[in-house]
Amino acid sequence: MTDSQSTEFRPLPNAGPTMSRVGRVDLHPRSTQDRPVTPARSRNPEEPAGLAEWLKTPEASRHVGQWVLLTHDYEVIDSALSPSELLDHHRDITNPLIVLVKPQNLRFVG
């Protein structure tokens, strides 16, 4: 048998580490099955479940033509005529949820 027909594994030169050099591979690192289960926060059935539902509420219709800063539970924090105005007034909010409430949006989801 010649070198070209050999079935022995030989790493390519300058190809970096191979599995045999790295060591054992853990197929289940940090499994989440052993962690305690945290139940999801139960929501009030009167609260909107999403942005489309919030746009159907009377509260959304009070802000037509305005940019609205919402919590992630769809409660109004503030409203303004521009998103930059909202960001200027609420610099402490790292993940803002800002929505322009347009009459077309209210008709589309309603």
Image (cartoon, rainbow, N blue to C red):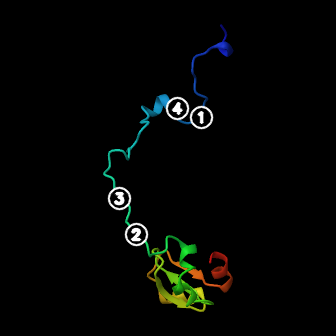
Which amino acid, by three-letter code, is at mark 1? Asn
Instruction: Provide the secondary structure element on which disc 4 rests.
Output: loop
Mark 4 is on which residue type? Answer: Thr
Viewer-proximal residue among 61 and 11: 61
Q: How crowded is mark 4: few (under 14 residues within 10 Å), some or many (20 or more)?
A: few
Which residue bears the numbered disc 3?
Answer: 39
Q: How crowded is mark 3: few (under 14 residues within 10 Å), some or many (20 or more)?
A: few
- Quarter of the image with the C terminus in it: bottom right
Q: How many angstroms separate mark 1 from mark 2 (CA)? A: 57 Å
The reply, left or right, for residue 38 in relation to residue 9 is: left
Quarter residue 56 falls in: bottom right
85, 102: nearer the viewer: 102
- The picture places residue 29, in percent across and down from the top left corner, at 40, 42
Q: From the top left corner, tell me how far across and down residue 90 is, in percent.
A: 47, 86
Residue identified by numbered label 1 = 14
Kind of residue at badge 3: Pro
Q: Can residue 87 be seen in this view?
A: no
